[in-house]
Image: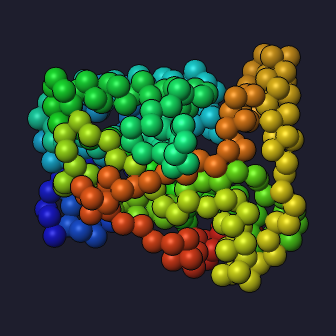
Amino acid sequence: MTGDTAAVTGATGFLGTHLCESLRSEGWEVRGLSRPGSDRGGREDLEWYVGDLFDRDVLESLVDGADAVFHLAGASLWSADPGTVHRVNRDGTATLLEACAATDAGRVVFTSTSGTRRPNGGDPVADETDVAEPIGAYQASKARAEALVDRYAERTGDAVTVHPTSIFGPGDRNFTAQLLAMGLEPTMPAYLPGGLSVVGVDDVVAGIVAAHERGERGEHYILGGENLTYDRAVSRIADALGGTPARLPVSAAAIRAAGPVAELVDATTGRRVFPFDRRMARLATRRLFYTSRKAHEELGYTYRPLEAHLPEAAAWYRDEVR
Ligand SMILES: NC(=O)c1ccc[n+]([C@@H]2O[C@H](COP(=O)([O-])OP(=O)(O)OC[C@H]3O[C@@H](n4cnc5c(N)ncnc54)[C@H](OP(=O)(O)O)[C@@H]3O)[C@@H](O)[C@H]2O)c1
């Protein structure tokens, strides 16, 4: 039981909800940032600070005196246009760091994404040093935010960055719901080519807290899980849960072809309809595998296999999504 105080941005999101629950169970006092209209999930055991990432005064009150600042708030292309994604991820991080610099704030743990790293050259598995040219507004905005956090750690205060891979767990209506649907639903006939690193939400939460406790100032840590082709992930879900797996792969060519179509629709309608362009479409067909060796060695980070996360995620899916 720590009795320490944590300030959490993104406390109302998928990952933030799990983090706050874990921090509370470990005895932390938790301050959560919430926008006026956010769904706070009925959590009365958090102290809520109401405002958004551009509300400097609210951010200063949120972080002042906190032993740890867990910065999770972010926007993705599934829920926001590219301009908003840049504003929230890059400018929002800048405002938060300014608030930390102006107050008595403890270590900042910034949650970026593994997407700013990518396997390159001969090695099929990426580590923290494999910095990739960003593809799309999400990766670009996260890369910019990382640079701001690095500079803050170098010149101003204490900060570390974590890079979760694809997070799997109850409460996530995007990636988790889609992967479960591919493993469970006979009506979902297709799975994607390529592969990814799937990590349980509880493992990411433990990694974030470990980065606060044991991370090296200014360092970056990939928090990944099992590296799986979609094919393998989908059949393991079906085997474990008795589902009917998606049988037909969507061909890589079809996905690559969808990129230019999405661009054309966006250009024609003058607004963003699909969250990817041709470069992002090409990326979706690759095997994006990662190693968490550095986090394991320096933070004591471990992850469990996909099957360990299935019962809880599947129960949530059956109750809330189906
Ligand atoms: N999920 C993944 O697989 C994954 C993988 C790698 C990295 N990440 C990163 O992990 C973090 C959390 O992801 P998630 O999956 O939990 O996302 P999420 O469920 O969409 O949650 C995003 C959170 O950010 C808040 N937020 C968005 N715009 C804001 C603004 N302008 N001001 C204040 N708060 C704002 C949201 O508030 P509202 O509740 O009001 O919308 C919500 O609490 C993100 O930074 C994401 O990039 C996620």
Picture residue at 65% right of the left edge, 54% below the top: 195
**Vertical arrangement, residue 287 with respect to residue 83, above or below:** below
Of 44 and 95, nearer the camera is: 95
Q: Position of residue 89 (x, y in %)?
A: 45, 30
Decide if residue 257 is on the left or right side of residue 138. Answer: right
**Vertical arrangement, residue 128 with respect to residue 187, above or below:** above
Work out whether residue 321 can be spotted: no
Picture residue at 32% right of the left edge, 55% below the top: 295
Q: Position of residue 97 (x, y in %)?
A: 27, 28
Locate the C terminus and report the quarter of the image it occupies: bottom right
Picture residue at 79% right of the left edge, 58% below the top: 191
Locate the N terminus and report the quarter of the image it occupies: bottom left
Q: Quadrant of residue 136?
A: top right
Work out whether residue 136 can be spotted: yes
**Vertical arrangement, residue 43 with respect to residue 268, above or below:** below
Q: Quadrant of residue 154?
A: top left
Q: Quadrant of residue 314?
A: bottom right
Q: Position of residue 69 (x, y in %)?
A: 25, 43
Of 117 and 152, nearer the camera is: 117
Picture residue at 25% right of the left edge, 24% below the top: 151
Q: Position of residue 53 (x, y in %)?
A: 39, 31
